[in-house]
Image (tube, grey):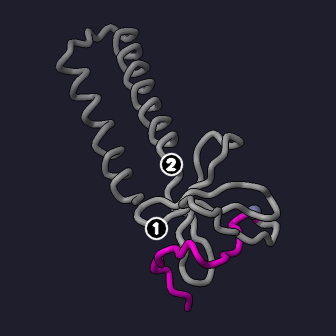
Amino acid sequence: VQSQKAQKIDLNIDYPCPCRRRGRLVPIVLTEAFGCNRCQQIFVVHDNGYVIEQLSTNYPYKQAWRWTGHQWNKAYSGLRDNYLAMGGVILSVLLISFFLSAIGLNVNPFNLAAILLVLLIPLIVWLAYRR
Ligand SMILES: [Zn+2]
């Protein structure tokens, strides 16, 4: 059974790259970052040294990993992902209020706030448990 506990990333050690090209992460001198010798990606160390985050614009969201001592485990997917979720909530609220007015219900600000709360609570719980 492999330990899933995150270990602190040592900038003086070479790690394998989380890309699937068997690359090595080489520390970049005087920075808190690694560069891969195969995929040419740069990974910045975050969360007091427990997470590396990919410095990339190739993905709609940032990718991050934690080191378990044996391998990289996918960590959170970065802030942009959360913004997308927030955008989804706002869109849902708009759609619901459109729907409610379409079926003849007047949406007053109190109803809208209630709908918003019902949608936001699961989102907040979801975000809290993701970390
Ligand atoms: Zn790589």
Region in magenta: 1-19
Q: Residues within 10 Å of mark 1 (few under 14, many from 20)?
A: some
Report if residue 128 lies within the magenta region: no
Position of residue 24 relative to residue 109, above or below, is below
Report if residue 9 lies within the magenta region: yes
Front in this rendered view, residue 69 or 14: 14
The residue at the point 61 percent across, 72 percent down is 72
The residue at the point 52 percent across, 73 percent down is 9
Question: In the rendering, which numbered label is found on residue 60?
Answer: none
- Please indicate whether residue 124 sits to the left or right of residue 8 in the image: left
- Please indicate whether residue 8 sits to the left or right of residue 54 in the image: left
Number of marks: 2
- Magenta: main secondary structure equals loop
- Please indicate whether residue 12 sits to the left or right of residue 76 in the image: right
Q: Position of residue 37 (x, y in %)?
A: 79, 64
* Viewer-side label of 2, 1: 1
The residue at the point 42 percent across, 61 percent down is 47
The residue at the point 40 percent across, 65 percent down is 48
Q: Using the rendered view, name the quadrant where residue 67 is placed.
A: bottom right
Q: Which residue is mark 2?
A: 78
Q: Using the rendered view, name the quadrant where residue 93 is placed.
A: top left
Q: Position of residue 75 (x, y in %)?
A: 52, 62
The residues bearing labels 2 and 1 have C-alpha atoms spaced at a distance of 16 Å
* Marked residue nearer the N-terminal end (2 or 1): 1
Ligand 1, seen in the image, is in the quarter at: bottom right
- Residue type at numbered disc 2: Gly
Label 2: element kind? loop
